[in-house]
Amino acid sequence: MPKTFLVVDDSASMRQLVSFTIKDAGYDVLEAENGKDAIGKLSKTKVDMIITDLNMPEMDGIEFIKKLRSMPDYKFAPIVMLTTESQEAKRQEGKQAGASGWIVKPFSPEQLQDVVKKFVK
């Protein structure tokens, strides 16, 4: 049974690009448009890894990660930030919230697949 990923981004085109790249590597994908939407989906389905944007309406990536880390099923799940933010202060904020990794947009499909392979066997 393939692993399942959740892609969280307020941009539909970015969700499609990330989803296509992950599906191309043989995984299943769920999509959410912000942290609040993602929490709702995660209450119904368990996923193996989460890829989330930082800047989103309703619940941003940092708040979303903090919420995830308080949920027993996601306390240790791999969570990668995929964002345009590259400042070290933002990276540290993400790490302190519980992010497992950080990818700066734009990215190559190979770069994303390499990060996914590091976290999901």
Image (cartoon, rainbow, N blue to C red):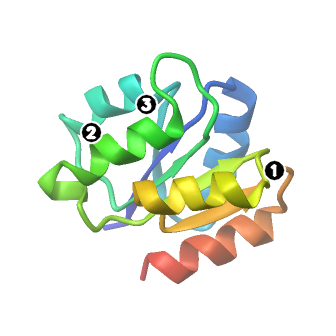
Taking 33 as reference, is 51 above or below it? below
Q: Are marks 3 and 2 in contact (CB under 8 Å)?
A: no
> To which residue does mark 1 refer?
105
Picture coordinates of residue 35, whole percent (x, y): 43, 30
* Residue occupying image coordinates x 57% and y 67%: 101
Which one is earlier in the sequence, the residue at label 2 or at label 1? 2
- Of circles 2 and 1, which is in front? 1
Taking 112 as reference, is 17 above or below it? above
Marks 1 and 3 sit apart, C-alpha to C-alpha, by: 19 Å
Which one is earlier in the sequence, the residue at label 1 or at label 3? 3
Marks 3 and 2 sit apart, C-alpha to C-alpha, by: 10 Å
Looking at the figure, which quarter contains the C terminus?
A: bottom left
Which one is earlier in the sequence, the residue at label 3 or at label 2? 3
Q: Is residue 107 left or right of residue 19?
A: right
Picture coordinates of residue 14, whole percent (x, y): 72, 36
Q: Within the image, what quadrant is residue 9 found in?
A: top right
Residue projecting furthest to the front: 89
Q: Element type at marker 1?
A: loop
Q: Within the image, what quadrant is residue 80 found in?
A: bottom right
Q: Which mark is residue 59?
A: none
* Residue occupying image coordinates x 41% and y 60%: 98
Picture coordinates of residue 29, whole percent (x, y): 47, 47
How would you rate the neighbour count of disc 3 (Cα within 10 Å): few for under 14, some for 14-19, many for 20 or more? Answer: many
Q: Amino acid at mark 1?
A: Lys
How would you rate the neighbour count of disc 1 (Cα within 10 Å): few for under 14, some for 14-19, many for 20 or more? Answer: some
Q: Is residue 118 visible?
A: yes
Picture coordinates of residue 90, whole percent (x, y): 66, 51
Q: Which mark is residue 35?
A: 3
Taking 106 as reference, is 15 above or below it? above
Q: Amino acid at mark 3?
A: Gly
